Amino acid sequence: MSESFVITIEPLGRQVVCRDDQPILDACLRAGVWLPHSCTHGTCATCKCDMVEGEIDHGAASSFALMDFERGEGKLLTCCATPRSDVTIEVDIDVDEDLEMFPVEDYVGTLVEKTEIAKDTVRLVVDLDREIAFNAGQYMKFTVPAAGDGSAPSVDRTWSIASPPTEAQRLEFHVRLVPGGRGTDGWVFKDLEPDQQFPMSGPYGRDLVVIDSVLAVEDIACPETSLKPGATMICTAQLPGIVAGGSHVDTATVTGTPTTASGAVPLDKDGQPLSPVTASDIAHAYAAPAPPALPTTGTEAGTLALVGVGLLGLGSLLLLVRRRRTS
């Protein structure tokens, strides 16, 4: 039987109960306490924080994401660390007060549709057993069943929600094949068929919305789907409280200067040319008569990306930034 401990989160002063076999991050998210996170499996270090007091087990934390000297200094990854006593952690939390965060819950998903929408890319339509509240750009965790022949154990994989928050029970996902990947090659593209059910949990992740002199925004049209090195992919999402429709990108590294269809560099609100964009895990939502191009320079393994940039008035730009992990 597992034992439970109290986790105190500073500077929030919040306390949650966490089992000794439960990652601290999971306990917090399920209690409605949002903590920084991205990959949720110990490799990105987004959830790294300081342990003020207590004892923990570091679990499967990568030695690259959490080095030995950091462990000695009392740092931990909340997505992997499990408590061995009451624990107090200090976390750098920067949450937009205007953005409502929703607790993580468990669901049962039923596959309604699996359609190939591009080379090595499928669209999954999944019905949940009940409605879910989430923000545009968040993602869900799928429990991939063990292989029928016993050759592979059950694992968790996460994919971004590609449907708007207004669709609260039927979710859409765009999944790209990762050769040899346990979740894609070994399940989604192999054994997963309509009417199959599987455990899911979520929502995970966070959106950060930055608005630059946006006066009005309307629905947009996405560019064509292309899958090649540094490719983009169609993906739409609702931007809560800001626009009726928009676009978002799954984890990607993007570098380039936004340009109009004619090749001109758009101007910012001060009339200056926009600077080149270089970022990871970014997304652009846009509204424009003609969407401009943004060059890309590669993607992380197993990710899908959509980048859209547009002009409004004299080059006003709406930037939607988010993080998520896929495999």
Image (tube, rainbow, N blue to C red):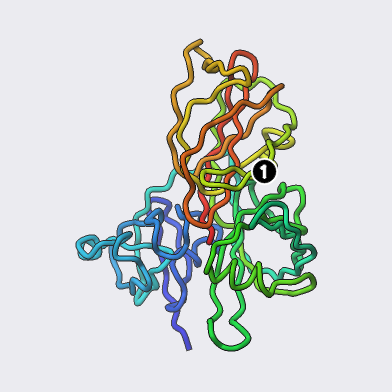
Q: Secondary structure at mark 1?
A: loop
Number of marks present in the image shown: 1
> Is residue 258 positioned above or below 159 on the image?
above
Residue 103 visible in the snapshot: no
Q: Quadrant of residue 235?
A: top right
> Is residue 64 positioned above or below 191 on the image?
above
Give residue 9's position: percent from left, percent from top.
Answer: 40, 58
Q: Label 1, on which residue?
A: 225
Q: Residue at x 25, y 65 (%)?
A: 71
State left or right for residue 193 relative to residue 210: right
> Is residue 32 positioned above or below 214 on the image?
below
**In this orientation, which residue lies closer to the viewer: 12 or 312?**
312
Q: Residue at x 64, y 19 (%)?
A: 312
Q: Quadrant of residue 242?
A: top right
Residue 255 visible in the snapshot: yes
Q: For mark 1, does the 10 Å Cα neighbourhood hold few (<14), some (14 to 19), or many (20 or more) residues?
A: some
Q: Quadrant of residue 218?
A: top right
